[in-house]
Amino acid sequence: MNYWLVKSEPSSYSWDDLLKEKRTVWSGVRNFTARLHLNSMTKGDLVFFYHSNEGKKIVGIAKVVKEAYPDPTSKEDKWVAVDIKPIKTLKKPVSLDEIKIEPRLNDMKLLKIGRLSVSPVTKDEFEAILKMSESEV
C-alpha cells in the first residue's frame, strides 16, 4: 500500500463536499509531477485530504477506489484522474504549522514542494500524522 496527500482549497472542493458526495473524481490536475503521482496510485491506497490556502491543514483520510484513467475535464489525452472516497475525518486536524515543527516530517513533500497538488507520503510520515491527529485508520 502507498500513501498520498491531495490538496484542495475548501472554497473549491472541501472535505465536507467529499463526505456528502461519498466519492469523487480527482481531476483537473495539470502538473506533470502530480500526474506521475496520480498514475502511481493504486486501488486501496490511503490519501490525506489537505485544505490548502484556507485552513492549511490535513482534515481527513480518503481511499483510492479507481486507478488512473483519462481526465474527463481535459481535451488532451495526457492528463489523468483517479476516484477517491472518504474513509475518516481526523479527530484533530493537523495544521501546516504543526507539520513544520515535527522532526519526523522534515522531509515531507508537502514542505519540500509546497505547490504540488498531489504528493507521496511515506508510511512513517503517515503514521506520524495519524498520531498527531489522535486518529486511527
Image (tube, rainbow, N blue to C red):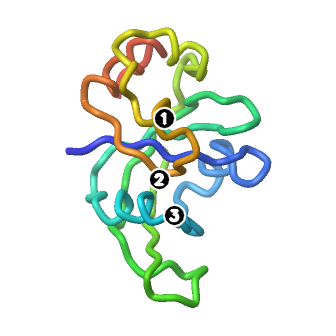
- C-alpha separation, residue under disc 1 versus residue under disc 2: 21 Å
15 or 37, nearer to the observer: 37
Q: Position of residue 83 (x, y in %)?
A: 45, 64
Q: Earlier in the sequence, mark 1 or mark 2?
A: 2
Above or below 70: residue 67:
above
Q: Quadrant of residue 72?
A: bottom right
Secondary structure of the residue carrying tag 2 is: strand
The disc placed on residue 31 is 3
Name the quarter where the N terminus is drawn: top left
Residue depicted at x 54% and y 62%:
24
- C-alpha separation, residue under disc 1 versus residue under disc 3: 15 Å
Q: Earlier in the sequence, mark 1 or mark 3?
A: 3
Task: Please name the amino acid that badge 2 sits on.
Answer: Lys
Q: Position of residue 35 (x, y in %)?
A: 42, 65
Q: Position of residue 61 (x, y in %)?
A: 46, 37
* Lateral position of residue 9 relative to residue 98, left or right: right
Q: Residues within 10 Å of mark 3 (few under 14, many from 20)?
A: few
Task: Please name the amino acid that badge 1 sits on.
Answer: Leu
Residue depicted at x 50% and y 47%:
6
Residue depicted at x 54% and y 31%:
89
Q: Give the residue at mark 2.
A: 85
* Lateral position of residue 50 relative to residue 132, left or right: right
112 or 63, nearer to the observer: 112
Q: Give the residue at mark 1.
A: 110
Above or below 50: residue 77:
below
Residue depicted at x 36% and y 57%:
37
Q: Residues within 10 Å of mark 2 (few under 14, many from 20)?
A: many
* Lateral position of residue 121 relative to residue 23, left or right: left
